[in-house]
Image (spheres, rainbow, N blue to C red):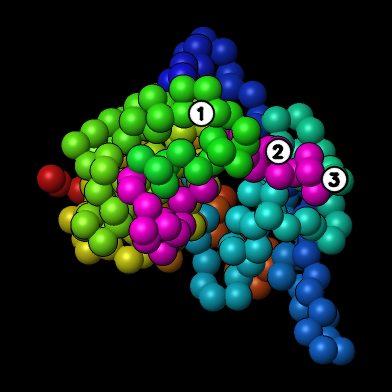
Amino acid sequence: MQKAKPDGNEPAGAMIEFINITKVYLMGNQEVNALAGVSFRIQEGEFVAIMGPSGSGKSTAMNILGCLDRPTGGAYHFAGRDVAHLSDNEAASIRNSEIGFVFQTFNLLPRTSAVENVELPMIYAGRMRNRRKKAIWALERVDLGDRIRHKPNELSGGEQQRVAIARALVNDPALILADEPTGNLDTKAGNQIMKLFRELNDSGITIIIVSHEEDIARQSKRILRFRDGMLERDEIIEKRYVPEE
Protein backbone atom coordinates (compact mmCIF):
# COMPACT_ATOMS: atom_id res chain seq x y z
CA MET A 1 0.00 0.00 0.00
CA GLN A 2 2.93 2.36 0.50
CA LYS A 3 3.46 4.83 -2.31
CA ALA A 4 6.68 4.53 -4.24
CA LYS A 5 8.78 7.63 -4.67
CA PRO A 6 8.94 9.03 -8.21
CA ASP A 7 11.93 7.95 -10.26
CA GLY A 8 14.63 10.52 -9.68
CA ASN A 9 15.41 10.61 -13.43
CA GLU A 10 11.88 11.63 -14.42
CA PRO A 11 9.93 14.72 -13.39
CA ALA A 12 6.87 14.00 -11.29
CA GLY A 13 3.52 14.76 -12.89
CA ALA A 14 1.39 17.74 -11.89
CA MET A 15 -1.12 16.46 -9.35
CA ILE A 16 -2.87 19.78 -8.76
CA GLU A 17 -3.53 22.78 -10.98
CA PHE A 18 -5.37 25.89 -9.82
CA ILE A 19 -6.12 27.97 -12.91
CA ASN A 20 -7.40 31.49 -12.19
CA ILE A 21 -9.56 30.23 -9.31
CA THR A 22 -12.09 32.66 -7.86
CA LYS A 23 -14.50 32.19 -4.98
CA VAL A 24 -17.23 34.68 -4.16
CA TYR A 25 -19.47 34.44 -1.10
CA LEU A 26 -22.66 36.41 -0.56
CA MET A 27 -22.93 37.98 2.88
CA GLY A 28 -26.26 39.75 2.96
CA ASN A 29 -26.22 42.09 -0.02
CA GLN A 30 -22.43 42.15 -0.25
CA GLU A 31 -20.12 39.98 -2.29
CA VAL A 32 -16.92 38.82 -0.59
CA ASN A 33 -14.07 37.77 -2.87
CA ALA A 34 -12.41 35.01 -0.87
CA LEU A 35 -10.18 34.08 -3.82
CA ALA A 36 -9.47 36.55 -6.61
CA GLY A 37 -7.84 34.68 -9.48
CA VAL A 38 -5.38 32.25 -7.88
CA SER A 39 -3.15 30.05 -10.02
CA PHE A 40 -0.51 27.51 -9.00
CA ARG A 41 0.62 23.95 -9.69
CA ILE A 42 1.66 21.28 -7.21
CA GLN A 43 3.66 18.34 -8.45
CA GLU A 44 3.18 14.78 -7.30
CA GLY A 45 5.33 14.12 -4.24
CA GLU A 46 5.66 17.73 -3.09
CA PHE A 47 5.36 18.95 0.50
CA VAL A 48 3.68 22.38 0.48
CA ALA A 49 2.60 24.74 3.25
CA ILE A 50 -0.11 27.36 2.76
CA MET A 51 0.22 30.47 4.92
CA GLY A 52 -1.55 33.78 5.30
CA PRO A 53 -3.31 36.04 7.78
CA SER A 54 -6.97 35.63 8.72
CA GLY A 55 -9.13 36.36 5.69
CA SER A 56 -6.30 35.75 3.22
CA GLY A 57 -8.13 32.92 1.42
CA LYS A 58 -5.96 30.05 2.61
CA SER A 59 -8.85 28.10 4.21
CA THR A 60 -11.02 28.62 1.13
CA ALA A 61 -8.20 27.31 -1.04
CA MET A 62 -7.84 24.28 1.22
CA ASN A 63 -11.57 23.52 1.01
CA ILE A 64 -11.45 23.65 -2.78
CA LEU A 65 -8.30 21.50 -2.86
CA GLY A 66 -10.12 18.88 -0.78
CA CYS A 67 -13.24 18.92 -2.98
CA LEU A 68 -15.21 20.24 0.01
CA ASP A 69 -16.19 23.40 -1.87
CA ARG A 70 -16.40 24.52 -5.48
CA PRO A 71 -14.83 27.60 -7.04
CA THR A 72 -17.00 30.34 -8.47
CA GLY A 73 -14.74 30.59 -11.52
CA GLY A 74 -11.60 29.09 -12.99
CA ALA A 75 -10.54 25.45 -13.20
CA TYR A 76 -9.22 23.00 -10.62
CA HIS A 77 -7.49 19.95 -12.07
CA PHE A 78 -6.72 17.04 -9.75
CA ALA A 79 -4.72 14.21 -11.31
CA GLY A 80 -5.75 15.42 -14.76
CA ARG A 81 -9.49 15.76 -14.01
CA ASP A 82 -11.42 19.02 -13.84
CA VAL A 83 -12.95 18.32 -10.46
CA ALA A 84 -14.65 21.71 -10.14
CA HIS A 85 -17.46 20.44 -12.34
CA LEU A 86 -17.89 16.92 -10.99
CA SER A 87 -21.15 15.79 -9.44
CA ASP A 88 -21.45 15.66 -5.66
CA ASN A 89 -21.10 11.87 -5.75
CA GLU A 90 -18.01 12.04 -7.96
CA ALA A 91 -16.40 14.64 -5.68
CA ALA A 92 -17.22 12.48 -2.64
CA SER A 93 -15.57 9.50 -4.32
CA ILE A 94 -12.33 11.47 -4.77
CA ARG A 95 -12.44 12.62 -1.14
CA ASN A 96 -12.96 9.08 0.12
CA SER A 97 -10.41 7.29 -2.02
CA GLU A 98 -7.69 9.74 -3.06
CA ILE A 99 -7.44 12.41 -0.35
CA GLY A 100 -6.73 12.01 3.36
CA PHE A 101 -7.74 14.79 5.75
CA VAL A 102 -6.15 15.83 9.06
CA PHE A 103 -7.71 18.57 11.18
CA GLN A 104 -6.58 20.74 14.08
CA THR A 105 -9.27 19.34 16.39
CA PHE A 106 -8.54 15.67 15.50
CA ASN A 107 -12.29 14.93 14.85
CA LEU A 108 -12.18 11.52 16.53
CA LEU A 109 -15.31 9.78 17.80
CA PRO A 110 -14.89 9.99 21.59
CA ARG A 111 -16.48 6.66 22.56
CA THR A 112 -14.74 4.70 19.82
CA SER A 113 -11.34 3.00 19.97
CA ALA A 114 -8.39 4.14 17.90
CA VAL A 115 -8.66 1.22 15.50
CA GLU A 116 -12.40 1.78 15.02
CA ASN A 117 -11.81 5.48 14.33
CA VAL A 118 -9.26 4.55 11.69
CA GLU A 119 -11.69 2.11 10.07
CA LEU A 120 -14.27 4.82 9.38
CA PRO A 121 -12.96 6.01 5.96
CA MET A 122 -13.00 2.42 4.71
CA ILE A 123 -16.60 2.03 5.86
CA TYR A 124 -17.60 5.25 4.06
CA ALA A 125 -15.80 4.09 0.91
CA GLY A 126 -17.37 0.62 1.08
CA ARG A 127 -14.00 -1.07 1.49
CA MET A 128 -14.86 -3.78 3.98
CA ARG A 129 -12.31 -6.43 3.04
CA ASN A 130 -9.43 -6.70 5.54
CA ARG A 131 -10.71 -3.55 7.23
CA ARG A 132 -9.32 -4.29 10.68
CA LYS A 133 -5.98 -5.47 9.31
CA LYS A 134 -5.54 -2.27 7.28
CA ALA A 135 -6.50 -0.08 10.24
CA ILE A 136 -3.91 -1.80 12.45
CA TRP A 137 -1.32 -1.37 9.66
CA ALA A 138 -2.05 2.37 9.55
CA LEU A 139 -1.76 2.72 13.33
CA GLU A 140 1.50 0.80 13.33
CA ARG A 141 2.81 3.13 10.63
CA VAL A 142 2.32 6.09 12.98
CA ASP A 143 3.87 4.20 15.91
CA LEU A 144 0.59 3.48 17.72
CA GLY A 145 0.46 -0.28 17.34
CA ASP A 146 0.24 -0.59 21.12
CA ARG A 147 -2.69 1.84 21.40
CA ILE A 148 -5.22 0.33 19.02
CA ARG A 149 -7.84 -0.34 21.74
CA HIS A 150 -7.46 3.03 23.47
CA LYS A 151 -10.20 5.64 23.23
CA PRO A 152 -9.34 9.30 22.54
CA ASN A 153 -9.60 10.34 26.20
CA GLU A 154 -6.95 7.72 27.01
CA LEU A 155 -4.48 9.26 24.54
CA SER A 156 -2.37 12.42 24.62
CA GLY A 157 -3.02 15.20 22.12
CA GLY A 158 -0.08 14.08 19.99
CA GLU A 159 -1.31 10.49 20.02
CA GLN A 160 -4.81 11.60 19.04
CA GLN A 161 -3.36 13.46 16.06
CA ARG A 162 -1.42 10.32 15.11
CA VAL A 163 -4.71 8.40 15.10
CA ALA A 164 -6.12 11.11 12.83
CA ILE A 165 -3.13 10.73 10.50
CA ALA A 166 -3.58 6.94 10.48
CA ARG A 167 -7.23 7.51 9.56
CA ALA A 168 -6.08 9.75 6.69
CA LEU A 169 -3.64 7.06 5.52
CA VAL A 170 -5.85 4.01 5.64
CA ASN A 171 -7.33 4.35 2.13
CA ASP A 172 -3.81 4.80 0.69
CA PRO A 173 -4.34 8.37 -0.55
CA ALA A 174 -2.18 10.15 -3.09
CA LEU A 175 -2.67 13.43 -1.19
CA ILE A 176 -2.93 14.38 2.49
CA LEU A 177 -4.45 17.76 3.39
CA ALA A 178 -3.73 18.93 6.92
CA ASP A 179 -5.44 22.04 8.32
CA GLU A 180 -3.42 23.48 11.24
CA PRO A 181 -2.36 19.94 12.27
CA THR A 182 -0.17 21.18 15.15
CA GLY A 183 -2.47 23.97 16.33
CA ASN A 184 -3.68 22.13 19.44
CA LEU A 185 -0.32 20.60 20.36
CA ASP A 186 2.66 21.73 22.38
CA THR A 187 5.97 22.33 20.61
CA LYS A 188 7.39 18.85 21.21
CA ALA A 189 4.26 17.01 20.06
CA GLY A 190 3.90 19.36 17.09
CA ASN A 191 7.46 18.68 15.96
CA GLN A 192 6.83 14.93 16.25
CA ILE A 193 3.78 15.28 14.01
CA MET A 194 5.78 17.28 11.47
CA LYS A 195 8.51 14.62 11.52
CA LEU A 196 5.84 12.05 10.70
CA PHE A 197 4.60 14.19 7.79
CA ARG A 198 8.16 14.46 6.47
CA GLU A 199 8.52 10.68 6.62
CA LEU A 200 5.21 10.18 4.80
CA ASN A 201 6.29 12.67 2.16
CA ASP A 202 9.61 10.84 1.77
CA SER A 203 7.56 7.71 0.99
CA GLY A 204 5.97 9.53 -1.97
CA ILE A 205 2.73 10.96 -0.55
CA THR A 206 1.96 14.54 -1.51
CA ILE A 207 1.42 16.67 1.61
CA ILE A 208 -0.29 20.08 1.84
CA ILE A 209 -0.64 21.78 5.20
CA VAL A 210 -2.22 25.05 6.28
CA SER A 211 -0.37 26.74 9.13
CA HIS A 212 0.02 30.18 10.66
CA GLU A 213 3.31 29.18 12.31
CA GLU A 214 6.45 30.04 10.36
CA ASP A 215 8.60 27.33 11.98
CA ILE A 216 5.99 24.71 11.06
CA ALA A 217 5.63 25.92 7.48
CA ARG A 218 9.39 25.97 6.97
CA GLN A 219 9.53 22.23 7.63
CA SER A 220 7.85 21.81 4.24
CA LYS A 221 9.65 22.22 0.92
CA ARG A 222 7.57 25.10 -0.47
CA ILE A 223 5.34 27.84 0.95
CA LEU A 224 2.38 29.44 -0.83
CA ARG A 225 1.72 32.77 0.89
CA PHE A 226 -1.79 34.18 0.54
CA ARG A 227 -3.04 37.71 1.19
CA ASP A 228 -6.37 39.37 0.37
CA GLY A 229 -7.57 36.42 -1.68
CA MET A 230 -4.49 36.31 -3.88
CA LEU A 231 -1.30 34.29 -4.02
CA GLU A 232 1.24 36.85 -2.83
CA ARG A 233 4.37 34.70 -3.04
CA ASP A 234 5.41 31.18 -4.05
CA GLU A 235 8.53 30.37 -2.04
CA ILE A 236 10.81 27.36 -2.49
CA ILE A 237 12.51 26.34 0.77
CA GLU A 238 16.20 25.97 -0.03
CA LYS A 239 17.10 24.82 3.48
CA ARG A 240 14.14 23.40 5.37
CA TYR A 241 13.89 23.79 9.12
CA VAL A 242 14.28 20.51 11.02
CA PRO A 243 13.97 20.92 14.82
CA GLU A 244 16.41 19.21 17.11
CA GLU A 245 14.93 16.19 18.86
- Count neighbours of disc 2 (C-alpha within 10 A) and say few if under 14, some if 14 to 19, many if 20 or more: some
Of residue 216 and residue 65, the one placed in the foreground of this image is 65
* Label 3: element kind: loop
The disc labelled 2 sits on which kind of residue?
Answer: Ser
Q: Residue 192 location in percent, x, y?
A: 24, 47
Q: Mark 3 points at which residue?
A: 87
Q: Distance between the residues labelled 3 and 2?
A: 10 Å
The correct choice, above or below, for 209 with respect to 225 in the image is above
* Label 2: element kind: helix
* Label 1: element kind: loop
| 210 part of magenta stretch | no
Q: Residue 108 location in percent, x, y?
A: 41, 56
Of residue 112 and residue 166, the one placed in the foreground of this image is 112
- Give the number of marks: 3
Residue at (82%, 89%) from the top-left corner? 28
Occupied quadrant, residue 214: bottom left
Is residue 239 rendered to the left or right of residue 4? left
Residue 99 in sight here:
no
Q: Residue furthest bottom?
A: 29
Residue 81 in sight here:
yes
Tag 2 or tag 3, which sits nearer the N-term? 3
Q: Residue 85 location in percent, x, y?
A: 86, 46
Q: Name the residue under label 2.
A: 93
Residue at (32%, 66%) from the top-left corner? 184
Occupied quadrant, residue 31: bottom right
Tag 1 or tag 2, which sits nearer the N-term? 2
The disc labelled 3 sits on which kind of residue?
Answer: Ser
Residue at (50%, 61%) from the top-left corner? 51
Q: Mark 1 points at which residue?
A: 172
| 92 part of magenta stretch | yes
Residue at (36%, 58%) from the top-left corner? 111
The disc labelled 1 sits on which kind of residue?
Answer: Asp
